[in-house]
Image (cartoon, grey):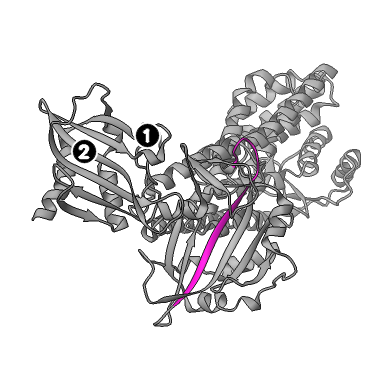
Amino acid sequence: MNEFVKILLSLSVSGALLLLLILGLKPLYKNRFSKRWQYYIWIVVALRFLLPFTPDTTIIGSLFEKFDTTAITNEIPTNPNVPVPADTGNNKAEPIQPNREITTAAMREPVDKYVCLFFIWSALTLVLFVRKVTVYQGFIQYIKAGNKEVSDIKILNLLSDCEEKLKIKTRVELSYNPLLASPMLIGFFRPRIILPVGEWEDKELSYIFVHELVHYKQRDMFYKWLIQIVVCVHWFNPFVYLLEKEVNKSCELSCDEKVISVLDDTARREYGDILISFLKSNNLYKSSLASVTLTEGAEQLKERLGAIMKFRKKSKVIIAITVIFTVAVCICFFATGAYAAPSIANEKKSFMEAVTDIFGNDEEKKQFTEIISASGETIGIIDDNKEIERFVKQLDIESWNDMEQLPEDIDLVYSYISYEVIDEPIFLQDGIPLVNMSTLEFYISSKGEYIIRDYNQEIEAIARISEEAGQFLNAPEDLELNKNITAKDILDEWGLDFYVPNSDIEKTDDIENARYYIGETSFTEKELRRTSKEQKIQFYGADKSTLLNEIDDISEIAQYLNGLSLEQWEYADNAPTPGEVECQIVRFMLSRDNKKELKEMDTQILYKSDGNYYIEEIIPGEYSDRGDIITHYQVSEEIAKYILSYIEIASN
């Protein structure tokens, strides 16, 4: 629903921009281009308001994606559960940047808002359209009630002659109506010209018939209702009413141009006199929705008479310029574009679903899902895009109930590992397509609950899922599986690099041994995940003889690291040597060699000198070829008190 609203708004903005562009250039073409061209060019604008077809990159599409990404970023709360890995090994501290994920609350709020907007838009669109149809039907009934068929053979023959000149094969009916003061044409498929009661000369009738028949031949009734559809769909956009006004005005000018194109100067004056004669009397009832009339109003008539008297046939140069201008408008039609596809970060989805949403119907998309049992046995591979799409739908992601962590009493049943070739711009690194791997682990608890852990290098989600989704995941044999190929076979064929956010990638197509670099420190994928999860921080007094506090819960560690406000630390190359030591903080993390023990990664000594607070950070020599790395920072009193509060909490 929210995507529909975004597409609608983007079409409205795109159409308005194209409308303003053509209107802005009107002084250049108003007296040079044909009135017929000035009439039909508005079809391009009308289609821009209605058709969501758009190239991959457009002005409005990019604008809406930018706004959309900004809005989602502002709505996504910080997740304190996953801090950044250890210091990179150089002598500068990096600011702590927590990962982010979309919570259930953040995801539901915009959905409700968009649903509300959709129903408001739908209701008003329907009411407006029904009203226009009702007005049309009422007008037709009103006209039919006063119609009287024309039986004068001379007049009917004159109408037939005009039809023959314009090569109109459809029979056009002719009536008198005393309720009207100006001739008009009604009917989509059964056209009828209606004349006001009066005495007419043959020449006058000829002009009237030709004018109304040109309206019929140009299908102006269909054109007008196309514009009415635009008005109904975009009722909230004031520019569509401007479009309606311009089309109605251009319609009469175009028709006049067609009529006078074969007339001499004298006949043109006579034609203009007829327009003036009908304006002098007032119509009792007139609807532009149901008919096309000979006259529309004094202001427009003045413009029409001016155009009649200034009419000149267009030169070949003007025709060539018109063609060029038309091509330029069509290019602008595509360049403005519309919002087309959602950004990956805009919805609460697994990475696998987001990619499938964009590429799921593309049979050429490179993607597959490998299914592995808890014992490590490969069950099979889903390598059909339609089957992957069905698999994602069965997950029923909207019904997931988020959990903070996995319960202890659960058993891993299957792992669904998805590989996708990412070639969207937001995933490109130096323009090279990459492979993303995401994993969905399926668990069953001792209580019979179905639980999943869905993660890649950026996002992790833990949730209880519905019974239907759980039973589906628990029966992979019911899927269309390819058991004659392995994941390695497919990856070897692709020969692409693996995607890791915010890092450099060592060129390799072996995901088992690929090393990802953060600064100068490299990790395998498993180490990268472990390093960010398993660690502890110890707080000591002036020396390391007495342990005053220890935190090893990942959420508490994240909270502490975020509160350090590293962006406020100032390098202090000339800092005094530690004197009045307040405390020492030691951080332990898994070592890079993938052992199971936690090793000391760095020590920070908080001390005070001359009323200022400093931190001396020591990184052990085993992580550097230059021995211990020692860096000094000056910090504010607030940051110092924040660090000391962890000792005070333990003391209390």
Place of residue 245 in the rendered image (x, y in percent of width and height, measured from the top left): 59, 36
Place of residue 46 in the rendered image (x, y in percent of width and height, measured from the top left): 64, 41
- Looking at the rendering, which quadrant does residue 298 occupy? top right
Q: Is residue 427 left or right of residue 278?
A: left
Foreground residue among 175 and 255: 255
Q: Is residue 436 magenta?
A: yes
Q: Residue at x 34, y 42 (%)?
A: 96
The kind of secondary structure the magenta stretch mainly shows is strand
Whichever of callouts 2 and 1 sits on the residue coming sooner in the sequence is 2
**Number of labelled discs?**
2
Name the secondary structure under disc 1.
loop
At label 2, the amino acid type is: Ile
Above or below for 346 versus 445: above
| Residue that protrudes farthest toward the bottom in the picture | 447
Above or below for 202 versus 180: above
Provide the residue designation for mark 2.
605
At label 1, the amino acid type is: Gly
Foreground residue among 256 and 179: 256
Q: Residue at x 79, y 19 (%)?
A: 318
Which label lies toward us, 2 or 1? Answer: 1
| Residues rendered magenta in the picture | 428-444
Q: Residues within 10 Å of mark 1 (few under 14, many from 20)?
A: few
Provide the residue designation for mark 1.
627
Q: Is residue 185 visible?
A: no
- Looking at the rendering, which quadrant does residue 240 occupy? top right
Place of residue 68 in the rendered image (x, y in percent of width and height, measured from the top left): 48, 44
Q: Residues within 10 Å of mark 2 (few under 14, many from 20)?
A: many
Name the secondary structure under disc 2.
strand
Q: Is residue 112 visible?
A: yes
Circle number at residue 193: none
Foreground residue among 192 and 621: 621
Q: CA distance from mark 2 to mark 1?
A: 18 Å
